[in-house]
Amino acid sequence: MRRLAAPLLIILLSGHCALAAAPTALQVLKRTAWAAEHVSYQGRIVTIDWLEGQGTSAVANVWHSGDRTRFAYVAPRALAGQTVVITDDIRRQYNPRTNTLTQSPALPDEGDIDVALLLRNYRVTLEPQYQTVAERHCYVLHLSPKDPSKPHRVLWVDKASGLTLKTAQHRPRGVPTSVSYFTRVATGVSLPNSLFKLVTKRGVHVVSTLPLRRVSGSHSATRGITAPRRLPGGYVLRGESTSLSSPSRRHFRYSDGADMLSVYISPGSSALPTGRGITRVTIHGRPGVLVDRHQFAVLTWTSRGRTYALVGDVTRPLLLAVANALR
């Protein structure tokens, strides 16, 4: 018995240490939030979106370092050859076929995880077993919304680097809406500055939006158009932008830490959408139209001389609650 006692004690202690070393869901979440800002990488990423029951995919080579990211699309044919570069909080997309450069704000939380805000709106759990993505062992995190009308998310987090290598999203009844994953990836790479400079042809046509304004105070207001700081469902205002081609139209972007909502407000009363696939609703006692595109829904209505469009991947009750909070 004495001969067995020491080996048995070692085995028990080893098992205890292994158990103690296993990270918690919160630790993995914080690590992947940190990695999004600090881990450089290059690889190939596939994105699949489901729209009206049909899946569409895109494939791109990607490079990332600090706050700079470059995408070079290789598929499908409509996107192949196009390049997106995100630097200095600006997203630039160049289409060489049309020689068009589209510039828009890279919103403050685009690609980032707001851990504190996310934890207020989601329950985070960790699967006990690893899974493999791009030949790397990954922790699997589930983000279950406290509001059941929001989509459920799953993150596959690289055990070695903390980088999120795969994300999947589905609606409350399990209907998938999107998935994005690396097929190959190298982390901790050194990338030249020239990689994040976008080269265009002569005579390029530029389509641009005005810079994003950070939000301060209880409201954001521009030329009389205001938006609340907070909306039902735990959404917090993250940024505002406006198009040079339509400077009176405002785009307000909200986040609950994981999910995004977009609110577009324009002066004047525009005609509401018509045709197949629409549902008529009432907002502030006035008619509105809901169009469900499977991956997201669009709710449009007019009120007090303005036209509103609310875009998000949530169910009808939450969309209506958000719409009725916009005044």
Image (tube, rainbow, N blue to C red):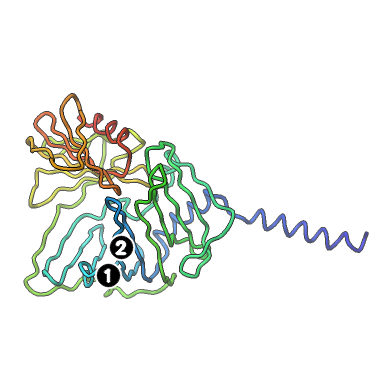
30 horizontally vs 175: left or right = right
Q: Position of residue 127 (x, y in %)?
A: 55, 52
Location of residue 49 in the rendering, given as x and y in whole percent from the top left corner: 31, 56
Does residue 290 sit above or below 141 in this rendering? above
- Viewer-side residue, 12 vs 303: 303
Q: Which residue is mark 1?
A: 75
Q: Are marks 1 and 2 in contact (CB under 8 Å)?
A: yes
For marks 1 and 2, give the CA distance.
8 Å
Tell me the kind of residue under disc 1.
Answer: Ala
Q: Residue furthest front?
A: 276
Q: Quadrant of residue 307?
A: top left
On the rendered image, what quadrant is the N terminus found in? bottom right
Q: Position of residue 243 (x, y in %)?
A: 12, 50
Which numbered dot is residue 51?
none
Tell me the residue that label 2 is attached to: 57
Point 78% across, 60% down: residue = 11
Name which residue lies at 32% across and 39% down.
Answer: 236
Q: Position of residue 147 (x, y in %)?
A: 40, 36
Q: Tag 1's secondary structure?
A: strand
Q: Quadrant of the C terminus?
A: top left
